[in-house]
Image (cartoon, grey):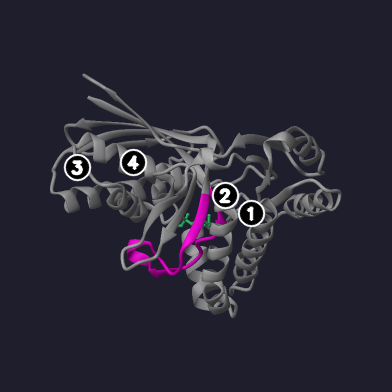
Amino acid sequence: MQIRVSTSSNIALVKYWGKSDAAINQPAAGSLSVGLDALRTNTSISTHTGADEISIAGKSDHDSIARVKAFVDHCRRSFRFTEHFLIESRNNFPTAAGLASSASGFAALAIGINRMMGLDLDSVSLSRLARRGSGSAARSVFGGFVEVIPDEDAYATVVSPADHWQLSVVVAITDEGSKQIGSTDAMNRTAKTSPYYQNWLSSHAEDLQAARRAVLDRDFDLLAGISEFNCLKMHAAIMTSRPPVIYWSAATLAVMQKVQALRDEGLPVFFTVDAGPQVKVFTLPEHEGAVAREIQGVHGVLWTIQTNTGGDPVVEVIPS
Ligand code: DP6
């Protein structure tokens, strides 16, 4: 039997940045994200005699493979099975460029192993399992708008399904290279050294509450304001780490300023940026074409990806 899982990347509108227990990716605060339907990881899993064989297209480096192996070992220990796997995973978007490939990647693995081994995990346990691979993966086991509840063993839950409120996202690719420092290391550095880290955490609950309200009320302006504010606060803390981490390129900033100018002209639009130089520009579906054209015209933008929000996982069982 082979299990094929397709999961989507998610973009946080209120970010996860900082852990209270790094060994288990326990976040220091909650977060709220939405799935990006067209940015997908496709993973196939089957059982295998001998050691695990793992192939991740575009990521042959030792660290990425070791992280997946550690996750699979964790599954074997936790659920007391001995099988090994043949795992093949590929993304339809650039990996390691701040487009959250670890989120969709580990969510796909958790869903696939759950199904392959008949673990029958409920959605809370499945989300917790994915989190052990990567904190943001806790959210990608669901589509739609999703929030992480940071209880003593954090998990994600659906705030509203994707069809509650359809948004469009234009992802501006400004740099295709791998990021200088991964989010795991950068968030630990921020927590240890940024003078703004405690403020980042103490103002988080308020942002989450506003973002949740905005989603439930389909209030675009409220969501725009809170998302940009939260994103810039996160980057302020990241930039003031020692040594500093600056994820933005000149084009990142140019896109952010373009978004502000478009908003001044009356378009419903806002940006968010994760741990990399790409910018995700949100708008309403009827403005997607116009926004995409404007963003493509910004100096330094290499290309764009357009996607709807959504991102429900899809699982296929191929009998042997
Ligand atoms: C900026 O989930 O990649 O995208 O738990 O160490 O794997 P680890 O970190 P990761 O961090 C995501 C950071 C972010 C914000 C977010 O997605 O909430």
The Cα atoms of the two marked residues, 4 and 2, are separated by 20 Å
Instruction: Report if the CB atoms under discs 4 and 2 are less than 8 Å apart.
Output: no
Query: In the rendered image, which residue does mark 3 sit on?
Result: 119
Pointers 4 and 1 in contact (C-beta within 8 Å): no
> Residue lying farthest top?
320
Q: Are marks 3 and 2 in contact (CB under 8 Å)?
A: no
Q: Which residue is mark 1?
A: 273
Provide the secondary structure element on which disc 2 rests.
loop
The stretch of residues the image draws in magenta is 11-33
Question: Is there any visible trace of residue 130 in the rendered image?
Answer: yes
Density class for disc 3 (Cα within 10 Å; few <14, some 14-19, many ≥20) is few
Amino acid on which disc 2 is placed? Gly
Q: Residues within 10 Å of mark 4 (few under 14, many from 20)?
A: many
Spatial CA distance of label 3 from label 2 is 32 Å
Can you say whether 63 is above or below 16 in the image?
Answer: above
| Residue type highlighted by circle 4 | Leu
Question: Which of marks 1 and 4 precedes in the sequence?
Answer: 4
Q: Position of residue 18 (x, y in %)?
A: 47, 67
Q: CA distance from mark 4 to mark 1?
A: 25 Å
Q: Where 298 sits versus 6, above or below?
A: below
Residue occupied by mark 2 = 98
Q: Which badge, 2 or 1, comes first in the chain's sequence?
A: 2
Say which amino acid is labelled 1.
Answer: Val
Relative to the observer, which residue lies in front, 204 or 172?
Answer: 204
Q: Are marks 4 and 3 in contact (CB under 8 Å)?
A: no
Q: Is residue 88 above or below residue 102?
A: above
Label 2 near ligand 1 (CB < 8 Å)? yes
Can you identify the residue that label 4 sits on? 109
Local SS, label 4: helix
